[in-house]
Amino acid sequence: MKLKQIKAMASSSSRTSYRSLEDKCTTLVNLNPDFRNWFVKVLVSEKTPIRFLKWGRQQKLVFVDKKNGSMHDIIYDQDVEQLDILLQLYKTYYIENAKIKEITSNTPIFASAKYQMLLSKSTYIKLANEEEQLPIDHAYQLTSFVQCPELADVSTKQINLLCSVVHVFLPRFVEKTKRNLQEFVIVNEERRPSILTLWEEFLQTEAPFLAQNVHTLPVILGMRLSVNTFYGILISI
């Protein structure tokens, strides 16, 4: 058998395998603690750095599916390092029968979310092939800068922005709030400048990266930001 024929058979077998996974998939909105024997096909739309808490390590992710359903996902302790490498941002995966748990926290990542997914090394996770990857453009609902003033100081309103960082200010302490912050000038395709404020924990992670690379005008995607009028119209994370 010629090499080309062998490759063609392997490719056909792969397509059949992925097709069978597709046929098994349900949507994220259907998942609950009582649902059994399920598959989902999801894109990793958000991924936090690994955080070291008093009781151990933790990493959070957000999955979205082709129906625009979203789910908050958590990895703990000994499973973090392996799954951090496996689950890459903006890649699509098939996942089977991870644990679904009711959210009891007072500050869930989505205000309307009822459940979250707990991932471990024993969770079945398979990278979708290139043909099966979900597009990322449907995963984010972006807010324009023009809309920001009407959303200011509305605690229930959170926005997503795609913008470029064009200037950085030095970190400073705000006496009124007793907190440290660092501010950045951002612009988007509307060419309207605004101020992005990073508070506290972000001063050790995202802020240094932006400050060091501001000369490249980095393009960033900010998720679940708030708009306030602390000093004019500000966008905070």
Image (cartoon, grey):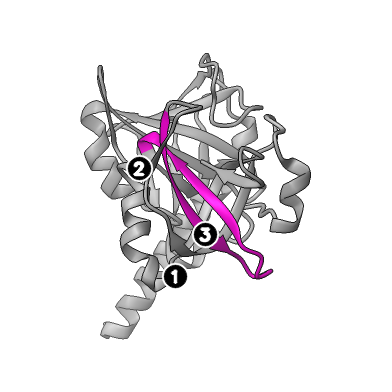
Is disc 2 placed on a helix, strand or loop? helix
Placement of 178 over or under 185, stated as above or below? above
Q: Which residue is mark 3?
A: 185
Q: Are marks 3 and 1 in contact (CB under 8 Å)?
A: no
Task: Determine crowd level at label 2: few under 14, some 14-19, many 20+ residues with C-alpha closer than 10 A.
Answer: some
Task: Determine crowd level at label 3: few under 14, some 14-19, many 20+ residues with C-alpha closer than 10 A.
Answer: some
Q: Amino acid at mark 1?
A: Leu
Horizontal and vertical percent position of residue 118: 41, 27
Q: Is residue 173 visible?
A: yes
Residue found 60% across the figure and 54% down from its top: 161
Q: Is residue 24 visible?
A: no
Residue found 42% across the figure and 40% down from its top: 181
- Examine the structure image and report whether residue 96 is included in the region drawn in magenta: no
Q: Amino acid at mark 3?
A: Val
Placement of 35 over or under 96, stated as above or below? above
Work out which quarter of the rendered image holds the N terminus and state it: bottom left
Q: Which residue is mark 1?
A: 217
Horizontal and vertical percent position of residue 121: 27, 34
Task: Give residue 203's mark.
Answer: 2
Residue found 37% across the figure and 58% down from its top: 210
**Left or right: 51 as drawn, with respect to 164:** left
**Left or right: 76 as drawn, with respect to 232:** left
Is disc 3 placed on a helix, strand or loop? strand
State which mark lies toward you, 3 or 1: 3
Residue found 65% across the figure and 39% down from its top: 228
